[in-house]
Image (tube, rainbow, N blue to C red):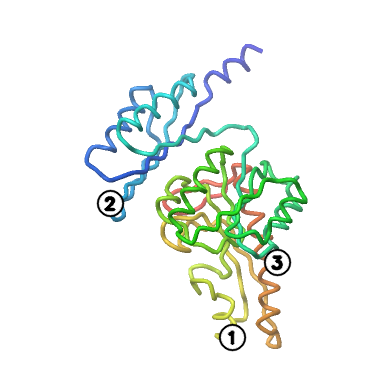
Amino acid sequence: MRKSSANKVMKKTVVGITVVGKDREGIVATFTNFAFSKGGNIEKVNQNVIKGLFGMYLEVSFSKAVDVKKFDSDIQSLSKKEKMDVSTHHETNSQKNIAVLVTKEPLCLETILANVKSLKGKISVIIGTEKTLESIAKKVKIPFVAIEDKDQSKAEEKIIQICKQYNIDLISLARYMRILSPNFVWRYPNRIINIHPSLLPAFPGALAYAQAYERGTKIVGVTSHYVTENLDQGPIIFQDSFKVDPNDTLEKIKAKGQKLEADTLLKAMKMHLENKLEVRWRKVHIK
């Protein structure tokens, strides 16, 4: 019993910190110094600047016990002082909260919901760009929020607040037909999973199946990947494919592809929630 207790005390605590706001000199040092002052060791630092917007992800480990609530409270005080938007993410064994973002295509959402018991997480909220799929959410008694703002920056502000409200750990884009901005993506590094209807890197954009059909592709694939600020260029998690018969119509290719999309997205979510994935140097490694 003593040995078990000692192991628990010695177990490393890892905290992910995201910092987003107006770029200015000294902000990196401010937050890394804060982590050091709390006895933390910097495991990872990633930072980006686009059009004056600064984004940073810090991964800090603690070899000694840390008061998580006090740490969060202190870093929020610092964020107000520095006028930055800061959030923390703590890796725990507890059930993860999932937000599923949708538009109007139902198959990915239906597949996730049909297999929800196999996920080490809870679908806490479904967020739609319209109300088309609201009835699916109501059937399974999961909160559905429609955010119909045409202005994507305003829509993202609302999505961020909803994700904070439900303490979201993972965001799944189940055929969510909007492009997320760096301001949103940087807040959830390697915690947003998307599906793309081709074997990346190839056939970019929304008309991948039409491009594949027009080019006479013999194999069509789908790719699940983490979302970054670069469209369809995030670290690849899992890929699968199917053969195309010369007699297949575009509609038949789409039907085959959409089923595979749903299955591939589900598999990527499972792997993420089971902590089987690690991103190093823009590549996903399976543990």
Q: Amino acid at mark 3?
A: Lys
Q: Residue furthest top?
A: 2
The earlier-in-sequence mark between 3 and 2 is: 2
Residue that numbered label 3 is attached to: 259
Q: Position of residue 252 (x, y in %)?
A: 71, 79
Asked whether disc 3 touches disc 2, contact meaning CB atoms under 8 Å apart, the reply is no
Q: Position of residue 104 (x, y in %)?
A: 64, 64
Q: Position of residue 83 (x, y in %)?
A: 32, 36
Residue that numbered label 2 is attached to: 52
Residue that numbered label 1 is attached to: 216
SS of the residue at dot 1? loop
Q: Nearer the viewer, residue 150 or 104?
A: 150
Name the residue rendered at 39%, 24% in the picture: 74
Q: Amino acid at mark 2?
A: Gly
Q: Nearer the viewer, residue 168 or 48?
A: 168
Q: Nearer the viewer, residue 247 or 97?
A: 97
- What separation in Å lies between label 1 and label 3 (alpha carbons)? 20 Å
Is 34 displayed left or right of 242 in the figure? left
Is 65 displayed left or right of 49 in the figure? right
Q: Amino acid at mark 1?
A: Gly
Mark 2 residue crowding within 10 angstroms, few (<14) / some (14–19) / many (20+): few
- What separation in Å lies between label 3 and label 2 (alpha carbons)? 41 Å
Q: Nearer the viewer, residue 149 or 136?
A: 149
Which of discs 1 and 2 lies nearer the camera? The answer is 2
Name the residue rendered at 35%, 31% in the picture: 80
Q: Position of residue 211 (x, y in %)?
A: 54, 80
The earlier-in-sequence mark between 1 and 2 is: 2
Asked whether disc 1 touches disc 2, contact meaning CB atoms under 8 Å apart, the reply is no
